[in-house]
Image: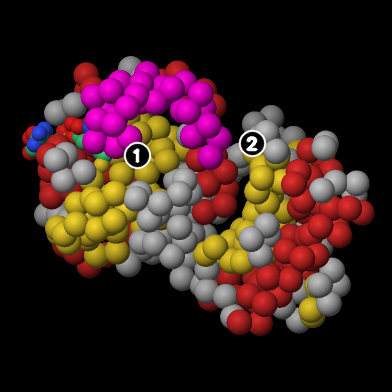
């Protein structure tokens, strides 16, 4: 099935919910943008294949309407000559900026290719952006890299910087640097316990690009400012009990990994401070978790250096992991004492 068709279907369904006039499902008067604004992170994410909101605070009426879209989707697909099986995932993130309604729609097709479209207004139309030559372009497909000005929550991939590092949301061109790190068995020792293959790293980059578009936070690549080399990676993401994707009802976690020849130089701690600042200041997180294998002394040492408190063992990623936490207040205090 042509990706253009899948994106058109995704646009129709996302716009139908966004418009509040759900002719496809016979439910009228929904206000997904208004409810997004009142949600803790200013957004509501909807998984149309599952027929539920995966993040945000959703009223029972809106939840019931979202559930109905799951049953309307096969009919809509059939009208376009497609089938629901053509989608591996179909998600939309709704947010209400200072003056405009914004929908980021992510489609993953059967072979796992991910496409991201950003729309504004009602009816939802493609976002126009100005390119580096000052030309107005329509923003379609691909992960968006827009300048964040002063929204309540970043809507797209955000770069951070520290004294020695740039933290850049995962991009395709990070593949070889990330793979070099992730294929090192010592780096993976306390995580999967085995080196990651090139194709696994590639798949992860695809997933992370989609997560940035859906959630507005995910994994960054750490790039050393001086050399331009990839020296690590880190994340702010929702934890998960098992499975492969973050779970909206799990707390936010901070995580890190560093290329082996760069260990012991404070890189993880330096990057972690910037990522924690992002989580508390930009995402308005109330608390942040970090988890590691109980034997992973270096990682728990980073957690303690950040001022995190040990909560005990808990099950995350289908394993018993040492769990640490820091609240927004404790972070403010810890930050005040850091040089
Ligand atoms: C964990 C990791 C990211 C730390 O990166 P890093 O840049 O070396 O971290 P930092 O230099 O900021 O801090 C590491 C601290 O751990 C200490 N440390 C190192 N090995 C240790 C060990 N076995 N036990 C206890 N502390 C240890 C270091 O001395 C340092 O503390 P210090 O600054 O007080 O001396 C890195 O070791 C790594 O990539 N490990 C493999 C991936 C991984 O396990 N990631 C975490 C998954 S939960």
Give the residue number, with chain letter if any, for mark 2: 112
Region in magenta: 178-207
In this rendering, which labeled residue sits more in front, label 2 or label 1?
2
Location of residue 78 with respect to 166 vertically, above or below:
below
Image side of residue 311 versus residue 146, left or right: left
Around disc 1, counting alpha carbons within 10 Å, would you say few (fewer than 14), some (14 to 19), or many (20 or more)?
Answer: many
Residue at x-position 52% and y-position 54% = 215
In the rendered image, residue 2 lying in the magenta stretch gets the answer no
Image side of residue 337 versus residue 14, left or right: left
Location of residue 296 with respect to 232 vertically, above or below:
below
Q: Which mark is residue 234?
A: 1
Residue at x-position 51% and y-position 27% = 202
Residue 119, image x, y percentages:
72, 53
- Residue 302 visible in the shown view: no
In the rendered image, residue 180 lying in the magenta stretch gets the answer yes
Disc 2 to disc 1, C-alpha distance? 23 Å
**Location of residue 133 (image quadrant):** top right
Q: Would you say the residues marked 2 and 1 are in contact, meaning their CB atoms lie under 8 Å apart? A: no
| Quadrant of the frame with the N terminus | top right
What's the magenta bit mostly, secondary-structure-wise? helix
Around disc 2, counting alpha carbons within 10 Å, would you say few (fewer than 14), some (14 to 19), or many (20 or more)?
Answer: some
């Amino acid at each position: 099935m042509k990706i253009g068709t899948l994106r058109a279907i995704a646009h129709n369904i996302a716009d139908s919910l966004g418009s509040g006039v759900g002719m496809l499902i016979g439910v009228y008067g929904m206000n997904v943008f208004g409810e997004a604004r009142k949600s803790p992170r200013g957004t509501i994410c909807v998984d149309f294949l599952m027929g539920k909101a995966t993040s945000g605070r959703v009223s029972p009426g809106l939840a019931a309407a979202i559930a109905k879209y799951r049953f309307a989707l096969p009919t809509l697909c059939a009208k376009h000559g497609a089938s629901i099986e053509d989608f591996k995932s179909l998600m939309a993130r709704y947010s209400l900026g200072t003056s405009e309604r914004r929908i980021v729609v992510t489609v993953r097709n059967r072979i796992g290719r991910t496409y991201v479209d950003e729309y504004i207004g009602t009816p939802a139309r493609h976002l126009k952006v100005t390119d580096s030559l000052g030309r107005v372009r329509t923003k379609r497909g691909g992960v968006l890299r827009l300048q964040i000005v002063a929204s309540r929550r970043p809507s797209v991939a955000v770069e951070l910087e520290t004294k020695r590092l740039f933290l850049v949301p995962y991009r395709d061109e990070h593949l070889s640097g990330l793979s070099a790190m992730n294929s090192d068995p010592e780096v993976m020792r306390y995580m999967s316990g085995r080196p990651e293959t090139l194709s696994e790293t590639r798949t992860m980059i695809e997933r992370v690009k989609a997560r940035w578009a859906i959630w507005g936070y995910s994994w960054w690549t750490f790039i050393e400012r001086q050399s331009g080399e990839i020296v690590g990676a880190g994340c702010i993401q929702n934890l998960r009990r098992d499975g492969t994707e973050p779970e909206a009802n799990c707390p936010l976690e901070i995580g890190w990994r560093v290329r082996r020849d760069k260990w012991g130089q404070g890189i993880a701690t330096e990057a972690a401070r910037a990522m924690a600042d992002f989580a508390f200041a930009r995402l308005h997180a109330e608390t942040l978790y970090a988890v590691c294998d109980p034997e992973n002394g270096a990682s728990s040492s980073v957690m303690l250096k950040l001022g995190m408190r040990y909560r005990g063992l808990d099950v995350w990623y289908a394993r018993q992991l040492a769990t640490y936490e820091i609240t927004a207040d404790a972070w403010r205090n810890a930050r005040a004492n850091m040089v």
